[in-house]
Amino acid sequence: MTAIQVSTGTPVQALNLPAENRSPPGVQPTDGGHGGQDAYAPATTPEGNATNQAATDLQGAAEALANMQGLARQGQNFAQAELDAGYLQQNVASARADLASAVGAEIDALMEADPGLTREQAAGIVASRFEGTPVAADVTDAIADADVRSAVASTIDGVDQSQGPEAALAGLDDALAGLPPDVRERVIADPRVQQWIEDAAARATEPLAPYIGPDATSDGREGEAVVSALQRLSWTTGELSPELAAAVLDAALGDFEQLPLARHGGGIYPNPMNTGSLDLVVQLASYVATAGNGQDLIGRLIALNGGNGGWEYATDAVQLSTNGDPRFSTTVGPALFVELERLGIPLTANGESPVVYAMGPILDDVHGTIQGHAEDYYGLVETLQFAQQMRPLYGSDAEFEAALDTLMRDKIGDDWQVQVESAQQALATDGSRLLGQLQQFMALPADHPLRVEVDALVNDILADPAAQAAIGFALRSDPSLVQGRSGELLLEMFATPGLDAGARGLAVEFGNAWISARTGPALAALDPADPASIAEFERQLSALDDPRLAAALGVDPAALEGAVAALVEAAPALAGDQAQQQAAQRTLNGALNDIDGFSADDAAGQVFRGLALSASGSAFMNANDLQVDDPRVETFLDAAIGNLEFMKGANFSAKALIGVAVNAEVIAGGSLVGKYGLGNAGVGRLLAAVGIASDTWQAIQAFGDGDVPGGVLHATAAGGVLAGLLGAGTWLGPVGWAVAALSYVGLGALEQARHNNRFETDAMREFLAASNLSDAAAAELFNTTGNAVSPVPFLLHYAQQQGLSVEQAIAWFNTLADSGELKFVVELAHRTIDAAGDDGTGLPATHESDAELERELAAPGANIVGIVLSHEPASCAQLDMLLEAADIPLPG
């Protein structure tokens, strides 16, 4: 336990202070002072006694500080001197740390004594002992701190340190993925990690050792040592996240700055034309650009060049990338050039700014590597997309999934799911790299002349379907992209004016993730019994009023201001009792509908409704100590979804989507606790489910409008694996879980391979035969007539227009197959689909030309056969006429 520091001055306890001066921050003393351990429920274990003692010590330390602050307010000169000394504040900080350590030890002991206890349950046991006491809030904070400490310790303990500090940092980087920012920061700040950083930096700068310090030598080879050290730094930091790379570079730069040339204002980089030293500086700047201190580090790298010129040779790094060096093409970025422009250091490369010149390899990467990965991914999942249209033909999810698995094993192999996930991860990696490069441009001031060209580049890349696919998967797999400096830079990027429709959908999705990252912790803590939790939620909501977010969501800043104000106004009632919540939901829905861009038919409106739904659900769960899969939560959410018009217009219910998502272990609470730093795993699962619904709004609207290819463009996948997340049967109509896994793979890929017979295989016929279709019906319905479009969605749509259920439609198909008439019906269906230009499910019930076809068929001497074989139906009514003319029984 940390020793409490004391002063030799007047004892605080002897001073007569008014009661109002005795309120320590975060701890309220009892009427008789801090009261000792008997103020709390007695503990029954040594660890519990230690926690009680630590709580007592904290209360005493906090009272001593508050009393001294009271004396200072009374004008007691000695008191201010005591406060200025800082020991009282340090005592409180030390006592808080000791309480967190004691609480953590007690939680661990409880779990060890009863292996059936979860950490949350053990923490509840500790907290219950202090309910109603002056330190209850401090114990709650200590539990949260102990949880962070536990996460920090387990993260570091899990890293293999046997291969040296560089390998340890690489392993740590993997372990940091998905952890919330506060945990990541504490992991990096841990003394053990700091030692790895110092050791890695020292090993990188080892070539400089003979040239720095009191025994420094000068043998004319300092330049070689600098290049060697830069190369080692590049190897060490190149595979690390920006924050870890920045920590290593920060630790290493001190040695470079101790070189004699650096200390005397000279440039340390040797002849850049021959040594490639500035190429390495370009790389290092790229690696650290988006770290919190990235701009400062780049400035230090620039300063090491002194007054020397030669920066034009730094563009060699760009030239190398354009010459096809894959290592450079995936690491070079514009950060150094942007900072040089920002600092007003002029240079050109081939007659233009290297900021513009650096765009070349990024575009090459999009059109090369990323395009290739997108095509590979589409090649793996296009059969899934096609097969999902057949889902209604199966009697159960289990039957469909079994048949689909057989189909995919035949198409791709037994490891087809692994292949799909691997391809998704490849695209996510591409997307993270691409976003890392693009956000470096955002450090250029908005009023800089080059921003016009930068914005044009951003527009071009975000409009590229392959880039959209990569970025979409990256946003779901790497939550750190929306956090910290990276999140701020990307918000500015997605606020770029003039984005095309596809890029705008991606921007809305980023905005949704950005909002979740900033409101999630307060939202998860909402509790009607805790006014402070509501106030914190209101504070975080108010911070959303940002014109950059308005631009990303595609709304006017004034509209966003109004929507935020409506949410803030509704927040207390959204966290109230059920009657208050339902009234607030309806009022908020009406208020949002009156704000341009926030109606239930707008993407931004659905994002905000999802936020309100999550807030209501979180408060309800916390107030009643429920998990999200409790039936009472389902009933509550069902009413809230209706009140808020959440997912209005979707061709499946938001309730069903949330229910399936909650029951999928892919989004078990732990993953969201890590992603957003939430303390409640159950609420984490709710946020995940609602977030998925919000993310897929663009897809749902496109699908609901009959725009299936457009829907494919905007379908999204939490974690990049919507197939595993939602499960079969969640989405109704002509689209489904597998289609959504396509994410942003664009129309180009879809259309390029459209006109062929690639789905007319024996495996596809067997897949259909495994449904409720007869073998004869399956043999006809797998016919795509060379355009790779199934007639099944259209024929199901037509049958349902006639009032048939799916089961009755299947019976109709089977009857037609038995009579040999299904072949003609399929041909007629394809004629309709070809004329409509999509899958035909948008065919209306009637059309203004219905009467004309009726007259043609009824005309004396009409060529009925010719009309039946050539007419392209413009409505379901016309299809009825043609079938009747061909003596084929109508459905029903």
Image (tube, grey):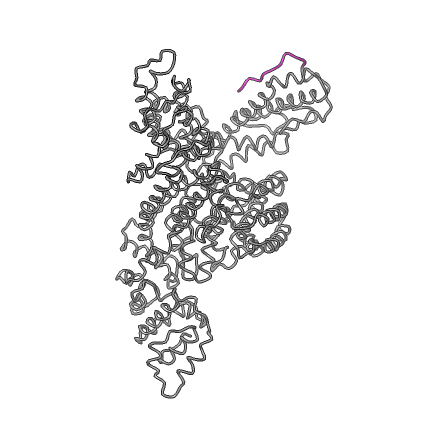
**The magenta stretch spans residue 582:** no
- Classify residue 599 as left or right of residue 433: right
**The magenta stretch spans residue 6:** yes
Residue 126 in percent (x, y) is at 55, 32
449 vs 637: above or below: above
97 vs 656: above or below: above
Image-quadrant location for residue 309: top left
Q: Please tell me whether the stretch drawn in magenta is mainly helix, strand or loop.
A: loop
> Which residue occupies the foreground of this view, 387 or 108?
387
Residue 733 in percent (x, y) is at 42, 62
Image-quadrant location for residue 221: top left
> Which residue occupies the foreground of this view, 527 or 603?
603
The stretch in magenta equals 1-10
Residue 90 in percent (x, y) is at 57, 21
How many marks can you see? 0
45 vs 622: above or below: above
Residue 751 in percent (x, y) is at 34, 59
User: Which residue of the protein is positioned furthest toward the front in this rendering?
Assistant: 351
> Which residue occupies the foreground of this view, 682 or 204?
204
Regarding residue 193, the answer to whether it shows in the image is yes
Regarding residue 112, the answer to whether it shows in the image is no
Name the quarter where the C terminus is drawn: bottom left
252 vs 671: above or below: above
> Which residue occupies the foreground of this view, 496 or 453?
453
User: Which residue of the protein is positioned furthest toward the bottom in this rendering?
Assistant: 860
